[in-house]
Each structure stands twice: as C-alpha cells, then as structure tokens.
Image (spheres, rainbow, N blue to C red):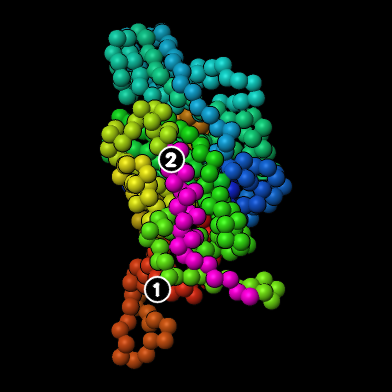
C-alpha cells in the first residue's frame, strides 16, 4: 500500500453511460484502481446535461456501485470530464517580465503566466475551461517546450484556450453538487482521454486522438510535443444507433444491440448472405435484417465523422504527411469492427485503438482497460498532475483503502467448458478470455452476446 499518495476520483458524465473510477498511484507510478462504478445515463444529450434530476440519479447510481466495489472508499471530490457542441477553442499569446532575473525560472512563474490568460476576453455567455501552454519563449530563445531552469528577463508563451457555455458548465457543476460531490476541476474530455492512451513516443511523433463517445466525437491533435488543436464533432455512437433505427425500422434498443453485436464500419467486409432475425412486435411476423445493409448505414455515418476529422487536421495544417503517429481511436465507439480500416481509408493516416492500460498497474480486471474508460482514467491522471505540481490540496491519509478483490484479475485456473466431459481437453480462463474479445465473440457464440448486453453497450 502507498498511503502517501492521494486517492483521486474521475467522473465521466457521458451521453450513454456515467462512470466513476477511484485510483491511486503505486510506488512505480502506475494507477491502482480502488473503486469502479457505472450506470446508464438518461439526462445527457450530445455531451450536455439537459435533465439535471435524471443526471443526479445516474451519478448517484454510479457512485453507489463504486462504493459497493470498495466499501472502505470515501468520495467527496471528483475530476469531471466536459464535452458538448458548445466547446470552442482559441489561440492567444502572453508574456511576463520577471522580477528576480538572476534566479532560474520556476513552476510558480509559469503558473502565474497561465493564470494571467484567464483574463483573456471571450464572448459573453462563455467561460474559460482550461488554458494550455504550447511553446514558450525566454528572451530571444524560441520554441522552448519547458522553460523551468532557464534564466532570462522575459517569459512568453502561445496558449490554447478552451471555452464552454456558462449554462452548460453550471448544469454539470449543479448535477455533481446535488449528487453530494464537489467538482475539483472540469477537464476537456479529449485531453483526459489523450493522457490515458498516449505515450511519450506518440507525443513526439504527432498524433490525433479521436474519442468516439455516445453523444460526441472529441478530437485532440498533438504535434512536436504540443497540443495544436481540439474540437468536438457533434456526431457519435448515438447517431449511428438512430440511423439504424430509422433506416431499418427497428426499436432503438434493437438498433443498439445490432450495432454492437453485428455491426461493421466497412460494408465490403460484411457478408451479403447473412441476416439478423428481429422478433416481431406484439404478434407481428419476425423481421429479417441484412448484415450488409446494417454495415452500409454504419459506414455512412462513420465516414462522415472521419471526414470531420480530416477537415480539422487540414484546418491546422497537419495533413497525412505531418502526423507520423497517425490516429489513435478510443472511447466506446472505437470498438466497432473494421473501424481501423475505414479510418485509414478516409484519412490516409495509420490508425490504432488506444487502450487506457498505458498508465494502469498490472493485475486489474480487463473491463477497466476498455477504451470506454479512457476519459475516466485520464481524469485521475489530470488530478495527479495537479498534485505533483502542488496546484491543489489533496487528502493523503487513506490507510484502510486497498485494491478490492473484485477489481483484481482472476488467477489462471483450469476450468471445464460447458458440456465438457471426461477425455475432452480442458481450457484455462486465459484461453477462454481470448475467445471473449470483441470480435471473435460474434463469430463464436451468438447466444452469449445477448447475455452480455449491458457490458457491450457503447
């Protein structure tokens, strides 16, 4: 146990799910997950809280589930992710003249320079969410990634300022507060997801993080170690579900199930002779749905989302010749079959799925390493960044809190398969888990898919 480190809690208020994860860094600097809870989200549309009462209920349910996973946990302060159509960004420039020019530049002076940017003029009705420094200058020295330790008279920097609608921010804070919690900080979701799935090599190579959630697709672009651009694209997993519902004339729950279990982002890869049978409503005959038609609908919407990504990359001059690290797909929507191939085809960039296991300690349950929880893990990392740079006060004495058994990976043991008799080969849990990954499960056993409906909701 590492009682010297604070327990930091991330709260991801999404369009389809609300997740609460509590974590603490171990002696190796990796996150141990001490509590985990989730719930269905009902009061949020396109990343914005519209129904406060429904959102409060969902936050409390997720929180209760988190406490059930670890009864010794106390949660009062949370880092909260923010997204939505109202998010905007702008570039500014700031400088300060130092008082003690003989001393080396300190963290305190950099924090002062950042704090000054919160006075930047922005349109009425908006509020500054975050100020992110890009490259620094010290006197005549340009493009300094980190000026701490330098000497000079004048420090300056270019800044990426993220703003949001005051009322949207107020609704989030009100929901969190009325659920019995305090918002330690609001963090832009693509930045949280980026910190969870990105390594130092990605930062240097240049990457675009595309976080496909339920209500929005969030974009963060990094080049030469600097955040160059952020954007919120107003289409995501819910839009695909609604397209399927309308295009195939099915219920929304059926559309969601079909998307998760049989959906593909490439129509050419779907079998033309495969059909899904949907039970008829109230005595009506069953409906046959073509897997090919389903893939066509998904591909159309996903191509549109990737066209937006390409548009934003061109806007900041970072087309396919500049980002050597390519595109990292994360969020629940990134688990769609053949999405990597579609992304590469539309954007011309290499793509991969980003899992938040880069910063997680080993031995956790596999559920926590899903792209769905990238934002939550990233929020905890943001909290640790604040703690390590003394930006905020944290309580650090949590003697009784250990990683609960239900969040630890089960040791590998020999277990018989269902229906396995004498003389039949045994299999390990690890072998069975290999069969339960997202894609091969569809090929192996259709019945299991319906059992795991809740786990597989995007």
> Mark 1 and mark 2 in contact (Cβ < 8 Å)?
no
- The residues colored magenta run 285-309
Tell me what residue is drawn at x 49 percent, y 23 percent. Answer: 90
Q: How many marks?
A: 2
Tell me what residue is drawn at x 68 percent, y 42 percent. Answer: 50
- 308 relative position to 241: left or right: left
Tell me what residue is drawn at x 34 percent, y 31 percent. Answer: 318
Which comes before the other along the chain, label 2 or label 1? 2
Q: Is 183 one of the magenta-colored residues?
A: no
- The quadrant in which residue 61 appears is bottom right
Nearer to the camera, 149 or 301: 301
Label 1 belongs to which residue? 444
Vertical position of residue 115 compared to residue 191: above or below: above
Q: Distance between the residues labelled 2 and 1?
A: 34 Å
Task: Where is residue 214? Give x, y as percent.
Answer: 54, 49
Label 2 belongs to which residue? 307
Task: Where is residue 118? Give x, y as percent.
Answer: 53, 20
- The quadrant in which residue 349 appears is top left
Where disc 1 sits, the SS reads helix
Nearer to the camera, 313 or 144: 313
Where disc 2 sits, the SS reads helix
Specify whether residue 154 is in view.
yes
Tell me what residue is drawn at x 33 percent, y 33 percent. Answer: 319
Q: Is 300 one of the magenta-colored residues?
A: yes
Vertical position of residue 413 compared to residue 182: above or below: below
Magenta residues, dominant SS class:
helix
- The quadrant in which residue 324 appears is top left
Density class for disc 1 (Cα within 10 Å; few <14, some 14-19, many ≥20) is few
């Amino acid at each position: 146990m590492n009682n010297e480190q604070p327990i930091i809690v991330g709260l991801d208020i999404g369009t389809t799910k609300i997740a609460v994860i509590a974590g603490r860094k171990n002696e190796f600097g990796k996150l141990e997950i001490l509590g985990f809870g989730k719930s269905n989200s009902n009061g949020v549309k396109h990343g914005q809280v519209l129904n406060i009462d429904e959102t409060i209920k969902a936050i409390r349910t997720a929180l209760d589930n988190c406490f059930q996973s670890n009864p010794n946990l106390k949660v009062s302060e949370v880092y909260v992710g923010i997204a939505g159509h109202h998010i905007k960004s702008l570039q500014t420039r700031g400088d300060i003249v130092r008082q003690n020019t003989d001393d080396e530049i300190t963290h305190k002076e950099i924090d002062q320079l950042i704090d000054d940017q919160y006075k930047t003029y922005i349109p009425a009705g908006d509020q500054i969410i975050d100020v992110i420094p890009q490259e620094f200058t010290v006197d005549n020295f340009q493009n300094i990634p980190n000026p701490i330790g330098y000497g000079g008279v004048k420090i300056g920097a270019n800044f990426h300022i993220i703003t949001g609608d005051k009322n949207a921010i107020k609704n989030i804070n009100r929901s969190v507060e009325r659920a019995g919690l305090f918002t330690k900080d609001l963090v832009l979701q693509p930045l949280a997801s980026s910190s969870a799935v990105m390594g130092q090599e990605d930062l240097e190579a240049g990457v675009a993080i595309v976080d496909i959630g339920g209500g929005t697709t969030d974009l963060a672009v990094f080049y030469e170690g600097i955040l160059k651009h952020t954007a919120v694209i107003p289409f995501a997993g819910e839009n695909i579900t609604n397209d399927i519902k309308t295009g195939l004339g099915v219920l929304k729950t059926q559309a969601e199930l079909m998307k998760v279990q049989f959906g593909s982002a490439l129509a050419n890869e779907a079998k033309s002779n495969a059909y899904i049978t949907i039970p008829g409503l109230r005595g009506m005959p069953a409906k046959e749905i073509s897997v090919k038609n389903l893939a066509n609908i998904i591909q159309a919407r996903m191509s549109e989302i990737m066209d937006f990504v390409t548009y934003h990359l061109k806007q900041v001059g970072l087309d396919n010749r500049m980002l050597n690290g390519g595109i990292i797909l994360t969020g629940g929507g990134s688990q769609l079959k053949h999405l990597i191939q579609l992304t590469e085809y539309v954007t011309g960039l290499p793509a991969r799925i980003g899992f938040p296991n880069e910063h997680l300690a080993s031995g956790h349950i596999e559920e926590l390493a899903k792209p769905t929880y990238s934002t939550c893990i990233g929020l905890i990392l943001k909290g640790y960044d604040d703690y390590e740079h003394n930006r905020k006060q944290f309580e650090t004495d949590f003697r009784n809190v250990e990683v609960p058994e239900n969040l630890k990976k089960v040791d590998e043991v020999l277990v018989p398969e269902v229906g396995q008799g004498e003389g039949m080969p045994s299999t390990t849990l690890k072998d069975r888990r290999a069969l339960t990954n997202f894609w091969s499960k569809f090929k192996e056993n259709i019945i299991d898919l319906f059992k795991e409906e809740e786990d597989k909701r995007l």
